[in-house]
Structure formats: structure tokens, C-alpha cells
Amino acid sequence: NSDADGSRGSGGHSTHYTRRPVHEQMRESIPAVVVGVGLLLMGSGLLFWNEGRAVQTSRSLDEGYNAVIRVASANVIHEENNHKLVHVWGTLSTFPVLTDDTYGVEINAVRLKRRVQMYQWIEEESSMRSEETPGMPTDTSYSYSFAWRDKVIDSSSFNIPWGHNNPTSIPVPSVIQVSENAKVGTYHLSPAIKEMFSEFISFSGDEQPEGDDIKLHGGMYYITRDIYNPDIGDLRIQFYFAGRAGEVVSIVGQQVGETLHPYLTTNGRELLIVHMGKRTVEEMFSTEHAQNRFLTWSLRVGGWFLMFIGLTCVSNIVNSLVLCSPLMRDMVALGLGSANLTLSMSTSLIIVGGAWAVYRPGLALLILVVAALPFVRAAVQHSTLEMFSRRANGLRGS
């Protein structure tokens, strides 16, 4: 133990307060420190990567907005726009019809998805700690039930595999068919654009499929003897489409001959925007900027939270630093709640500001000033308190 920090006496009795060395506290909380340091690294890494992504995405969008050519009609291809970024909108057409003959399903769309689920055993684990005997091990129990699942559940890994056997494979695979020929007006769509049609809508065929073991119910196809009492290994199948022919779609992409492709910006990022409906250039880029901001702030909050939890895990060390440093004590005394909250917020802002320094220096400077405010205010407050303390000591000496 270190020297006494203070004492209080009354009637010959005294109480001494000692501060344990930081290395002793750290040795006792090594596991928490390891987890905390890991979370701090993850949080700072996420913040740094996210800001770089946000900056580059914003740059690409700004570059694309300034370079895009507005095409008046998607039914006419202008050769002078070859290899340039263009904005087109028009009616979607596809060929040939996408079909699944087994279930009598067909549709004119960019993509047709078949989702297959199998009825299987699932294992659920629950743990209970005895309140009467806290030192006793935790009791773990396992329960088994049935559920529809997209992937095979390995029943051999169950705690009690006997009597809970699942098939080792799903006999009918889940697949996505893609139209060979998809166009907007006279512009052909590249495979990259076809992949952008990802909002799937469920549908079913109009006729009951042939075969007694295939049943259509509630828009789903069941391969079972009894849809209300399925057996392990029974299947249910649902179909979805994305990008139905006849719908209006707006695209910002690079014109290469008669085909639209992703556009490569100067920072090496691909720019490709696909929106359903008739959208202007301003609307499309505004939406993309809004989505970028939403993702950026979501990841910022996630990165800050990881750093806050990381600092909480090493709170013993942080508290020791606070006690040892008058400046840190004054910073925490600002009413911000805790050193963990203050440090995590300021560190996060420093990382964010540093990432924007080149692209938007004014914004970066403002962020860094805000990040430094707790430290600056604490330093001013600490200097003021020291000045008053010296004056008080001088008055006592005189």
C-alpha cells in the first residue's frame, strides 16, 4: 500500500485512507482489461473505417452528381454519351419468362427467387442458477421442438441426439433465377444492375400443382401428407419476384454501348443507383446522401458504444487515473456523468474530425473543437482553482 492519503482523529483514534497502486488494481482486473482494450480497438477501428467510407461515398456522389447527363428518353441511345454517366428512366421489360415448371410458377421479372424450408428438430438451451446455494454450478436444461428452417440443423450436435434426428440435406435447393435479357427502354441492364433488384415480393401460381404430395396453401407450396401436421423432413416452398416487367425504374449508371454498367469514380468507387419509379437526378442523389448519413450515424453510435463499454471494462484504471490527475478530476466534475462517457465521446469525435480533415476542413475543425471542450474547460477550471488556492495560501502567510 502507498502512503496514507488522509487521516481523521477523535479521542485518540484515527482512520487512515490509503490508495492502492494502479498496477495492483490492474492485476486484479486483467480479464476485464483485456476485453475492454479489445472493445476499444474495435470501436476506434469501426469509427475510423466508417468515416473513411462516409467521406469516399460522399465524394463519389458529389462527383457523380456533377458529371451525370440527363437522358430525355430511354428509347433513344445517344452515341455521344458512350462511357459517360447517364440518368435514364423508363419501363422495365424482361425476356424470357422466368418459370418453375414443377410448381406451375411463371412471371416476367428481373429475378425469381425460390425459398425452400424444411421441418426440423430444434434444440433450445436454458440455464438457471440456484438462489439458495449461490456457490453451486448453474443448472442447464435442454428442450426440443419443431420449426421450419432455411438451412439444415445438425442434430448430431444436440445434447440429446437420440430421437431428434434431422435429415442431412434439403432435397430441393433454394435458388434465384435471373432474366437473361432485362431492359429499360432500349438500354440493356448489366448483371450488376440486375443484382440491385433486391426487394422481393411473394407470390404464388394460379393453379394447384400436380401430385398428391404437393399442396398449395396460404401462398406456399407444401410437400407433405398433411399441411397441419407436417413430419420431420417435409418441405414448404415460397416464391418471390423482384423487378416485375412493366414497372417504371430510374437508373444512374455508365453507358457502354447499349448497356448500363456501374460508373467508376476517380476515388476508385463504383457508382450505380437504381430506384423504382420515376425519379429525378436530384431526388436520387438526395436519397443516396440521406442513406449514407443514416448509415454513418448508425455506425458512429455503434463505434462510440463499443468504446464506452470498453472504457467501462477498464474503469478501475480510469478511476485511478482520475484520482491521480487533478485535471481529469476537474473534467469529470463538469457534470458529464463519468470519465468513461466523457473520454469515449471526445475520442470518438477526434477520430471523426480527423477523417474529415482533408475533405471538409471547416467541419473537421468544428468537430475537433467540440471534442476538446471538456478538456479545455477542465484545464481552465483547474487553473482557476489553483490560482485561488495560491492566493488563499498567500493571505494566510501574510
Image (cartoon, helix red, strand yellow):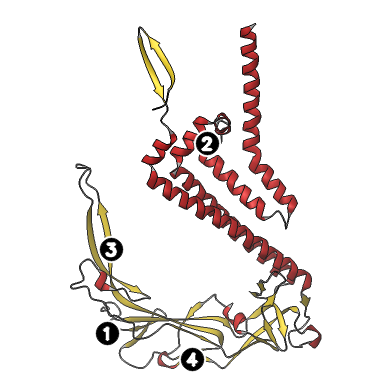
Q: Label 1's element?
A: loop
How many angstroms separate mark 2 from mark 1 (CA)? 63 Å
Q: What percent of the width, then of the height, locates residue 225?
A: 27, 84
- The amino acid sitting under disc 2 is Gly
Q: Looking at the image, is mark 2 or mark 3 nearer the viewer?
A: 2
Q: Looking at the image, is mark 2 or mark 1 nearer the viewer?
A: 2
How many angstroms separate mark 2 from mark 3 (CA)? 40 Å
Dots 3 and 4: beta carbons under 8 Å?
no
- The amino acid sitting under disc 4 is Thr
How many angstroms separate mark 4 from mark 2 (CA)? 61 Å
Residue 225 has which mark? 1
- Mark 4, residue position: 99
Residue at image point 23% right, 51% down: 138
Residue at image point 76% right, 88% down: 77
Residue 337 has which mark? 2
- Label count reads 4
Q: Closer to the N terminus: mark 1 or mark 4?
A: 4
| 6 to the left or right of 64 | left
Q: Closer to the N terminus: mark 3 or mark 4?
A: 4
Q: Label 3's element?
A: strand
How many angstroms separate mark 1 from mark 4 (CA)? 25 Å
- The amino acid sitting under disc 1 is Arg
Instruction: Compare residues 300 and 320 and report the one nearer the observer.
Output: 320
